Every structure is written in structure tokens, then in C-alpha cells.
Amino acid sequence: MIFYIIRRLLAAIPTLLAVLTLVFLIVRVVPGDPAIAILGDRATPDGIAALHAKLGLDKPIWQQYVDFIGQSLSGDFGRSMVTGRPILTDVGAVLPHTIDLTLASLIVGTVIGVPVGIWAALHRNRFIDYTARLLSLIGLSFPVFVSGIFILLLFALHWRLFPVIGNARLDDPVDRLDKLVLPAATLGLVMAAYITRVTRSAMLSVLGEDYIRTARAKGVPWRRVVWRHALRNAAMPVVTVVGLYIGILIGNSVLTEIVFNRPGLGKIIVGALNQRDYTMLQGLMVIYCFLIVVVNLITDLTYGLIDPRVKQ
Amino acid sequence: MADPVLSVEHLRTEFRIGGAWHPAVDDVSFVLAPGETLALVGESGCGKSVTALSVMGLVPSPQGRIAGGRIVLEGRALVGLPEPALERLRGARMAMIFQEPMTSLNPVMTIGAQVAEAMMVHQGLSRRQAEAKALAVLDEVKIPSPARRFHEYPHQFSGGMRQRVMIAMALACEPAVLLADEPTTALDVTIQAQVLGLLADLKQRHGMAVLFITHNLGVVAQIADRVAVMYAGQIVEEGPVTAIFSRPAHPYTRALFAAIPRMDRDAQDLAAIAGRVPSLDAMPTGCRFASRCPQAQVGCERPQVLAPLDEAHVARCHVATAVRGNWHQAD
């Protein structure tokens, strides 16, 4: 297992370098001079040259590349072109909110999705299965900005159980949790719908495997067949989907953030796009990709825990 | 003959095809005496495996069901028994080995845990006790350095070794009946011989009765006491292995023997059986082999029954049994 972990860690390094290179290239390939974008059409050539020097754009391209990689690896993503603050400061301020929301939705999604999926698979083509499938279809069909508003109307305005505005104080755990419940439920239910489907189909395919028949032929009680023989084998596709879904959650929670008025990574990305904050976008891309690489690493390590064949 | 450990009477197992139930096993009866090996022979899809699965109570549901007949294991009727009662018998009094050693072991459980499991479930042993006994069983099926391999996973085992593990799992609780469904078909010929030898050896030592399912007549000659030939869901001929090999009576059995290439003759045309097995939903009421039979004649369109040819030798063919019957009259 130790060797497997080391191998996966080493394999993450080239991935990260490739991602950084891609981000560097994308930013350079986009047409238009950032200096002109910042200073406007009526900028003087002197002003442009000065800004180029400040941004390091007067250096040869390879020098820019080396600087970029070096700075990214040391966590220095430069300053926002709009606010002038270090990018890491801006991102760092909202990252806890994003991590809160991602983890909470993940917990809601798996805690509901996995058992319901198993339950549906074990009652295939019966009432429970049809109900679970119908509910998950409904969950997948509602966009977050509809279901979120619906949840807000019901739980925040009608029953007044939770606050409407979601900008929590990070130093107050109760306030943090209080303002997390509704957005996490909104995102988590969509994820639960998705996980239910994946778990159900993974479980069904595993239950048709020969080794399940072998276990039954040994006289293993059905409950034990499901828990000990089927579940662990069915976990692989579920873990894959959960891993992919976390990546989606990190970047795509912008709609939820808007509906519940929460700060977060998604909002910053959209803000930076609107304001053409190139340095901010570049930094965000790197940070986002870094998070994805970390999530993938954790997914890989989970594979290793589940399936002994992966470690080979 | 001693009281049979297993008797199957008029077993009918059906599958649902396009909304209607069709029998894959139709009126199959046989008995298995203690310590006896009965070979169930026939081509793929003739109902051999379904017969074994019916005995184990493992017919895939809801698309399959046992529609009639009795299965009695050591005096206990199995058909209609609730699932928990069947679970207590499966693996304990009857065990099954499957054809595909590559997919029949759980890839995420260690070999040792899989062998120990049946003993924990049936004999109420603690994990440690069960593992100690599992180690002994792995040694008995001649897995080299079992203590080391105990903690390995199926993917670290070769096909032959996996089949030995399957045998160890089946033997763990000393069942009275072993159902072996083509246990050597997926193996290399040399490994095949080793596994057959091991099975024969273990059978002798534990006094098990074995229902050995195969399509390989060469294997039958090596291990069986009696042979039942199946065709299209029915037993078409049954008898002692010597009688079947020296005087095969049913045209299908004879065709099977004719299809074996022989080394002691010059270049010969392999006698393939013309035509194909009728499909489940288009089974004729008369002899099911008639459409492919060189001796088909008037009377074959009527339902055929198993009639005696000799003591303990029966065939489901009015032509074969009529001749024999006439001989008996002439005596």
C-alpha cells in the first residue's frame, strides 16, 4: 500500500506540470494584449510598455514560462488586476466556504444516494425501485436555481427554520452550520439523485457476477452476501463518480452561491470573467486544477483501499 | 442400493421467454447413492447446469423457477423450502463447483477468508478457528505453501489454483453431495488431469456423492460410476458407465460417441450431428432428437418415455427399447 501511495503521489507531479503548462499556453493564446485590456484603447505606448514590464510580458516567452511555473509552485499567483490584492488572499477568503459546501453536499449525496441505490437494486422492478428511480429522475431534472429557490421559500421563508442569506462568519461554527444546511441540501440532493442511479446499476451488475453465485452456493445468508461480497465490488464505480462529482461541485456551485448569497470559488470565477481579470483567472485555473488533482489522488488511493488488484 | 443421499424426481425447471414459461429441464429424475459419481453428459444448453442449480436452489429468479418435481437431500425435501432453510443446507450438506474459476471467486476478498467463510457461517466457528481449518483444507487440495497464499487475492492465482480454491471452499464443511459443473472445462489439459485426480481422491477420502456435469466423454470414462445423457432438457439415456460406453442405445448417445475423433483409425470424417437442438419455445411433443436422428421413423412423433434396456440401463427411444424388448420376448 505504501508503494502504491508513493507511486500515485509521483504520478500526480507530471499531471500538475502539464496542467500549469496548459494554463500558461491558454492565457498566451487568447488574442488581445492584456495591457491594452487593462489600460483601455487610449493608452500611451509608454504606459503599455511600463505595464508589460510590470507584468513581466517584456521577457522572452521561455523566461515567462519558467517564472510562471516557479511562482505557481511556490503559491504566488500574482495580484488581481481589478482589486490589486494578492490572488491567494482573495481565494483564501472564500475557499473555506467552498470546501464547506462541497463536503456537506458530498455527505448529503452519498449518505442518501448509496443506501437508496442499494435498496433499489435489491428490490429491482418493484415499487421501491420504481419510486427511487422516479425520485432520482426528478432530482436530476430540476436545475439548482429552481430547487434552491423552492427550498428557500419552504424552509427559510415559510417555516423560518434556516436563514435566507448564507454569508456565514467563519469563526462561528454554529453560524457556519446554520447557513450551510439549505445550500448543502440543494446541491446534495442533486448529487444523491445521481449517486442513487450509479449505485443501483453498479449493485445490479455485481449481483449478477459469478462470485455472488459462489457465495450463495456456500450458504452465505443473503444479507451477508450483499454486505460482504457485493458492496465492496460495487463501490468502485460509485467512488469514480463521487470523485468526478466533487470536481464539478467545486467549480459549478456558482448558481447555489448566488441563490443563497454565499461567497465561494464559483462566484469569484464568474466575477473575474465579467471583469476580464486575467491574472485572477489564471490563478483560479491553477488553483482549481490543483484541487482537482488532489481529489483525483484521493480517489485513486480509495481505489487502492477497495480493490487489491489496483495496487499491482 | 443404499438409501440415496440425493434423489431428484420429475424435476421441471422453467424459464420465462417472451412472457411464457418454457421448461429448460423437463421431467428429470435420478438418484445418487453415497460415495457414487454420476456423470451428467450433454451439450451446452441441454439443461445440465440448470439441473444442478435447481438442486442447490439457485435457479436465477424471477426469470426462472422450479415448476414441479421433488428434490430430496438426505431425506429432506428441498423444493419449496424457504430461503433461510436452503442457506443452512447449501455449503454444509451440498456444495457446488462452477465452470469458471476466473470469475467465480470474489476479487476483493482473500482466498483464506473465502474458504473460511462457509465454516464460520455453518459451524459457528470463530474467525481464528475457521481460518485454522481453512488452512488445513487448502493444504488438502494441494495448494503449495498455503500459509503464505492464505492472505493473497484471487488475481494472484492461476486458473488451476483457483479451481483448487473452489474445491476447498466446497469441501470445507464436508458436504454429502458435491455438484461439479464442468469443473475442468476452462483448464489446460494437464491441469485438468490434476484436478480430476484430486477430485477422485477427495471423493474417496470423504465419501461424498458427486454429480459431475460435463460434455467431455473422455472425462466421464475416468471418473464416473454411472452416466446420464441429457438432450434438450430430458435425460435420454442412463446406465452404468460400462454399459453406456460399450452399448450406447439412444441415437443421440451414439452420435456423441461418433463425434469423438479416434487416434487408432486412419483419417476420418468427424461425424458432426446434423441440424440443431430445437429452441425452448419450439419443443416438439414427440422425440426431441427426431429432427436430427438418422433412424427417425413412425412413432417418433409420439412422446417418448424412458424404457429399460437392461438392468439399470434405460433409454428414451422407442426404436432402441423396442428392439431390446423384442429380444427379451424371443428369450
Image (tube, rainbow, N blue to C red):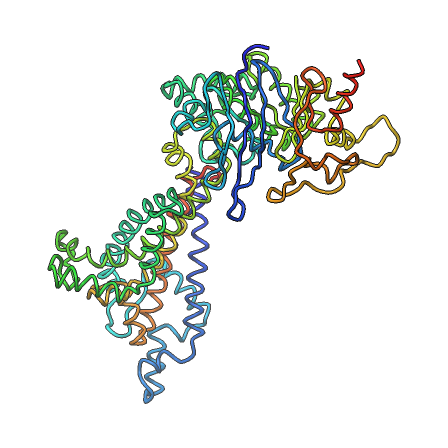
Does B16 sit left or right of B220 as displayed?
left
**Picture residue at 34% right of the left edge, 43% below the top:** A119
Residue B63 placement (x, y as % from top left): 49, 42
Residue furthest bottom in the image: A42
Which of the two residues, B109 or A273, is positioned nearer the viewer here?
A: B109
Residue furthest front in the image: B329
Residue B48 placement (x, y as % from top left): 60, 31
Residue B142 placement (x, y as % from top left): 57, 19
Residue A140 placement (x, y as % from top left): 34, 60
Residue furthest top in the image: B2
Which of the two residues, A53 or B289, is positioned nearer the viewer here?
A: B289
**Picture residue at 56% right of the left edge, 33% below the top:** B50
Res B2 seen here? yes
Where, quadrant-wise, is the N terminus of chain A in this rendering? Answer: top left
- Identify whether A72 is placed above or below B60: below
- Identify whether B253 is placed above or below A28: above
**Picture residue at 65% right of the left edge, 28% below the top:** B305
